Amino acid sequence: MRTSQIKRKTNETDIDIKLNIDGSGKRNIDTGVGFFDHMLDLFAKHGLFDLDVSCKGDTYIDAHHTVEDIGIALGEAFKEALGNKGGINRYGSFYLPMDETLALVAVDLGGRVYLHFEGEFKSPMLGNMASELVKEFFFGFVRGSNMNLHLKLIHGENSHHIAEAFFKGFGRAMDIATAIDPRLAGSIPSTKGVI
């Protein structure tokens, strides 16, 4: 089983994450930011990852530090659980429809850090979370995991649906990218021989 546990403590957040990549979608999420809990719940359910996330953050200021730092720590959890990445697909992509919304999510777990985020939210807030923090989460995740991530809103109007399409699509794309391909027989999915 590919598992990890990450603890990250700063003056702004105290985070504990447990991850099982080869799970069934069991999750226990408590970040102190209700909308963000909902998004991480969707990510784990649709990626079939067992995920426990707890955070005590300075949400009396706002949700920024909590969302960004969990992004970094969750990225680190995936990086640790994947080890040398031998045998994985490495790449994954998914088109996710959510009512009037359609989003594309594409990932490369190839060790290079890049985020392309193309999507606008009509609402400045998503529950108790600023909509701009959706991008901040994904930026933290790519930094923590050393991965390429492209998120593109094809079309959509409802801000909740847009965020949900990104997180569900991210779960599906990560499930594909982290899956083991038996034809690789554990070899590194790169002509360089290392990721």
Image (cartoon, helix red, strand yellow):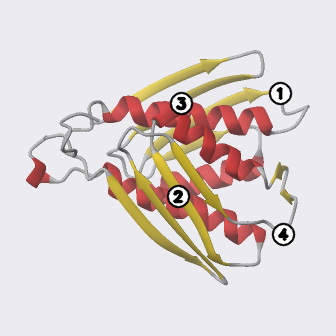
Which residue occupies 47% across, 36% down? 145
The earlier-in-sequence mark between 2 and 3 is 3
Give the residue at mark 4: 122
Q: Mark 2 belongs to which amino acid?
A: His
Is label 3 or label 4 in front?
Answer: 4
Is residue 77 something one can see in this rendering? yes
Which quarter of the picture shows residue 118? bottom right
Give the residue at mark 1: 58
Q: Is residue 182 above or below residue 103?
A: above
The earlier-in-sequence mark between 2 and 4 is 4
Residue neighbourhood size for the residue with mark 2, other residues' Cα within 10 Å, grouped as few (<14), some (14–19), many (≥20): some
Residue neighbourhood size for the residue with mark 3, other residues' Cα within 10 Å, grouped as few (<14), some (14–19), many (≥20): many
Give the residue at mark 2: 150
Find residue 23 and report its horizontal and vertical position in percent. 36, 47
The earlier-in-sequence mark between 3 and 4 is 3
Is residue 18 something one can see in this rendering? no
Where the N terminus falls, by quadrant?
Answer: top left
Find numbered disc 1 in the image and state the secondary structure of the residue it sits on: loop
Is label 4 or label 1 in front?
Answer: 4
Where the C terminus falls, by quadrant?
Answer: top left
For this view, does 128 lie left or right of residue 159?
Answer: right
The earlier-in-sequence mark between 4 and 1 is 1
Q: Mark 3 belongs to which amino acid?
A: Ile
**CB under 8 Å between callouts 2 and 1?**
no
Q: Is residue 52 above or below residue 150?
A: above
Q: Mark 1 belongs to which amino acid?
A: Asp
